[in-house]
Amino acid sequence: MLIQNHHVDLETPTGTMRVYVYRPVDDSTTAKTYPAILLYSEIFQQTGPIRRSAQIMAGHGFVVLVPEVFHELNPIGTVLGYDDAGRDKGNADKLAKTLEAHDTDTQAMIDYLRTLPYCSGKIGAMGFCLGGGLAYRAAIHPDISATSCFYATDIHSGLTPSQPGNESLTRTGEIRGELQMIWGKQDPHIPAAGRAKIYSNLVEKKVKFTWHEFNGVHAFMRDEGERYDAELQMLGYQMAIGLFKRCLY
């Protein structure tokens, strides 16, 4: 399936947010509609690996939106490097932006999708690292029907700031769609105790979810750097695409 892309600048309560849109090319005489995926990046925003992830998902029949997750804290178009400076800046941004601000970003993207004639109205969420935690957060929204979270950081720790009682763990019981949680067992950012905390909370809140732990390190989906595991990456995409095909089509 061929795809095309563009970007749009959406107004949010915390400022203008650039969103990158990837979608299938419709060359038929009858207009088609496609379900959508909100794809949340790592702390580095839309790097090459994140762009390629969006292209892969769009090529399997989804409208994919990639927001600049720290738009309030950086000039439009900022991409942080996979280096010490980029990591330090991204981690500082993570502590400076609240979950409530991420919530309004999600709402702005959902509102935008409602205006697109090629979007079917069915919406999922997906993310990596920080973005895995933001996808989990997006799953709380009643319009999100399915969510795939890859090595989601900060859910167990509550490191991303929020108002008291508004933590993602606390609000887990509001998730109504299906959740897919994918982890690397050798990931120091989400140790076994942290994963167990998330798992037991999902069970307690009776969320519909699947749980997958692989022998992988953090960021094994990222096709740059020494952490990349091509075999796990392919398996991860197959699992996510399967979830979204089943729940959004």
Image (cartoon, rainbow, N blue to C red):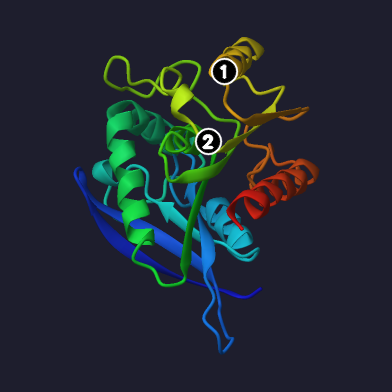
Task: Report helix, strand or loop for mark 2.
Answer: helix
- 204 left or right, relative to 102: right
- 15 left or right, relative to 186: left
Image location of residue 118, percent across then percent down: 46, 71
Q: Quadrant of the N terminus?
A: bottom right
| Residue under the point 28% across and 14% down | 164
What amino acid is found at the position of numbered circle 1 in the picture?
A: Ile
What amino acid is found at the position of numbered circle 2 in the picture?
A: Gly
Query: Which numbered dot is residue 89?
Result: none
Pointer 1 with pointer 2, Cβ within 8 A: no
Q: Is residue 138 above or below residue 49?
A: above
Q: Is residue 167 above or below residue 233?
A: above
Which residue, given by chain and number where applicable, does mark 2 sit on?
132
Q: Is residue 20 above or below residue 68?
A: below
Image location of residue 129, percent across then percent down: 54, 34
| Residue under the point 33% across and 59% down | 112
Specify few, some or many for label 2: CA neighbours under 10 Å numbering under 14, 14-19, or 20 or more: many
Image location of residue 102, percent across then percent down: 33, 38
Q: Name which of mark 1 and mark 2 comes first in the sequence.
A: 2
Specify few, some or many for label 1: CA neighbours under 10 Å numbering under 14, 14-19, or 20 or more: some
Which residue, given by chain and number where applicable, does mark 1 sit on?
198
Task: Report helix, strand or loop for mark 1.
Answer: helix
| Residue under the point 53% across and 42% down | 127
